[in-house]
Amino acid sequence: MKARLFFIVAAVAVASVASATDLVNRQFAVVERGNGIFKVIYEGKQLADVQMTIINRYGEVVLTKVFRKTNGFILPVNFNGMKEGDYTIKLESASGKYSKTIQYKVNRARSNEAPVVHVTRLGTANRYLLSIQGNSPEKLDIRVLDKAMNTLYHDSRVIGYAGIVFNLKDLIGSPIFKITTASGEQVLVKK
């Protein structure tokens, strides 16, 4: 089986603080790009107005934005200049209410370990967003496996940040995403 591959945005990154296994929020993901920037990703069921509200830990609204007649969007949100701490991002649309809490840290140091990998299931179809954030561009081996560890997709490329959507419509069961660096560091994510 061949996975269809789409690039979302050239530099969609990766470490999401939000839980990808939250069944209520399958249409909504927040991905950390680094440098204080988070990408809010929404995929709706129908065209509708969507209101996004960001609230700090004190319950104060720090941003409100309304998207008119949309069935999805990707929006980078810059937290630079904000106080360090937890922020809740809420979306409200005709499809329902969704929320994710992220943690913004100022000058977060990163080590030279394996890249941060996050996988989010998009909607109810077998579509998955694979987000990768490395310390710097390096050669990564990307594999998508089925539960029997058969390779469904394989690619090697030099990347530092990437967001890739996989359409695994013919897959029965849950996929396994395996990312290996040139130095042999591995990240395995089972969905």
Image (tube, grey):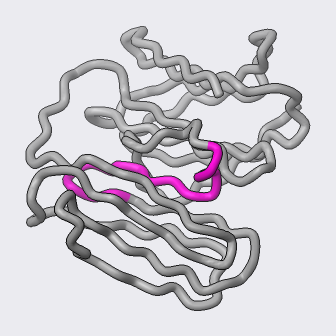
Q: What residue is rendered at 12% in x and 34% in y?
A: 109
Figure check: 132 above or below 66: above
User: Residue 36 magenta-drawn?
Assistant: yes
x and y percentages locating residue 72 in the rendered image: 62, 72
x and y percentages locating residue 116 in the rendered image: 38, 31
Q: What residue is rendered at 80% in x and 39% in y?
A: 168
Nearest the viewer among 112 and 106 is: 106
Counting every numbered tag in the picture gives 0
Left or right side of 61 for 15: right
Displayed quadrant of residue 143: top right
Point out the stretch of residues depicted in magenta.
23-38
Screen quadrant of the C terminus:
top right
Q: What residue is rendered at 38% in x and 63% in y?
A: 89
Displayed quadrant of residue 65: bottom left
Q: Seen from this angle, which residue lies furthest bottom?
A: 68
Screen quadrant of the N terminus:
top right
x and y percentages locating residue 84 in the rendered image: 11, 52
Figure check: 20 above or below 1: below
Left or right side of 43 for 64: left
Q: What residue is rendered at 53% in x and 61% in y?
A: 98
Q: Seen from this angle, which residue lies furthest front?
A: 59
Left or right side of 178 for 162: left
Figure check: 133 above or below 127: above
Left or right side of 128 for 87: left
Nearest the viewer among 75 and 114 is: 75
User: Residue 10 magenta-drawn?
Assistant: no
x and y percentages locating residue 150 in the rendered image: 79, 14
